[in-house]
C-alpha cells in the first residue's frame, strides 16, 4: 500500500491547527494519549467506498462512522466530509459532501443512513447544506472518466458547543472551531463511477 494510503493516519494537534490556521486551547496541548481514531465498518481507510454510499445509486446513504481514543474535555464533535481532489484538479473548489456540527461529546459513532432533508438530528446535532445545496449526506460522485477521488472524513473534537444554526456555511464552522480543537481524526475512502 502506498504512503498516500497508509492506514490509520493520525494528525497531531499541531498539524490540525496549522491546517486551519487555528490556535489550540492551553488544556489541549501535551496530552499523552493515543490519537483519536475515525473508522467505518463499511469500508477500510484508503479503501473503495461501496456503491450504496455513492452516487452510483439513486439514493445513497451515509456510512456508519465510529471513533475512539477521544480526549478528555470534549463537549461536541464536528464532522466534515469533502472531496479535496476536485480543487487539486482545479475544475471547481473543494466539494463539501457532509457537515454535521454539535454532535454530543458523549457520542462514539454516527449510524449508517443518517436521515437527510432535515438539519436537526435527534441528539441535537445539526446537518448543514452540502455542496449540492441539500441538507445532509451527499454521496461521492467522481466521474468514471477520471481517477479515483479521495473522499476525506474529518472528525474534530471540540471543547465547546458551536453557536451556529443550520444556515451556517463551512467557512463559518471552520472559523468557529478555531482555538477549540482538542483532537482531529481522518478517514479516507476512494471512489469514481
Image (cartoon, rainbow, N blue to C red):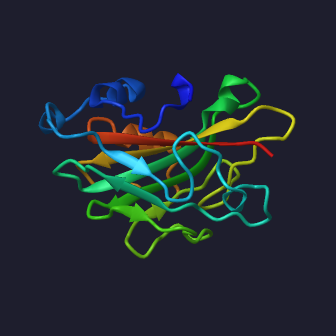
* Nearest the eye: 132 or 108: 108
The residue positioned farthest toward the bottom in the image shown:
122
Q: Which residue is drawn at 36% across and 23% down?
A: 18
* Nearest the eye: 184 or 193: 193
**Residue 118 in the image: above or below residue 98:** below
Residue 85 as seen in the image, left or right of residue 77: right
Rendering coords of residue 94 (x, y %)? 63, 34
Q: Can residue 75 be seen in this view?
A: yes
> Quadrant of the rendered structure where residue 82 is?
top right
* Nearest the eye: 87 or 107: 107
Rendering coords of residue 85 (x, y %)? 66, 30
Q: Can residue 165 be seen in this view?
A: no
Rendering coords of residue 1 (x, y %)? 56, 29
> Quadrant of the rendered structure where residue 26 is?
top left
Q: Residue at x 25, y 51 (%)?
A: 160
**Residue 132 in the image: above or below residue 9:** below
Rendering coords of residue 56 (x, y %)? 79, 56
The residue positioned farthest toward the right in the image shown:
145
Residue 13 as seen in the image, left or right of residue 141: left
Residue 46 as seen in the image, left or right of residue 90: left
Amino acid at each position: 500500500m502506498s504512503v498516500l494510503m497508509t492506514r490509520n493516519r493520525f494528525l497531531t494537534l499541531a498539524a490540525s491547527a496549522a491546517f486551519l490556521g487555528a490556535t489550540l486551547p492551553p488544556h489541549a496541548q501535551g496530552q499523552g494519549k493515543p490519537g483519536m481514531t475515525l473508522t467505518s465498518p463499511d469500508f477500510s481507510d484508503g479503501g473503495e467506498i461501496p456503491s450504496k454510499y455513492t452516487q452510483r445509486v439513486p439514493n445513497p446513504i451515509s456510512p456508519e462512522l465510529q471513533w475512539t481514543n477521544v480526549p478528555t474535555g470534549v463537549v461536541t464533535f464536528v464532522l466534515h466530509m469533502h472531496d479535496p481532489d476536485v480543487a487539486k484538479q482545479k475544475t471547481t473548489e473543494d466539494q463539501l459532501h457532509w457537515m454535521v456540527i454539535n454532535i454530543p461529546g458523549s457520542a462514539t459513532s454516527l449510524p449508517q443512513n443518517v436521515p437527510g432533508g432535515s438539519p436537526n438530528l435527534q441528539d441535537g446535532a445539526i446537518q448543514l447544506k452540502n455542496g449540492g445545496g441539500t441538507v445532509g449526506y451527499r454521496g461521492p460522485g467522481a466521474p468514471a472518466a477520471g481517477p479515483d477521488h479521495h473522499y476525506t472524513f474529518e472528525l474534530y473534537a471540540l471543547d465547546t458547543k458551536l453557536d451556529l444554526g443550520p444556515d451556517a456555511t463551512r467557512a463559518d464552522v471552520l472559523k468557529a472551531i478555531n482555538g477549540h480543537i482538542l483532537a482531529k481524526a481522518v478517514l479516507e475512502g476512494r471512489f469514481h463511477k
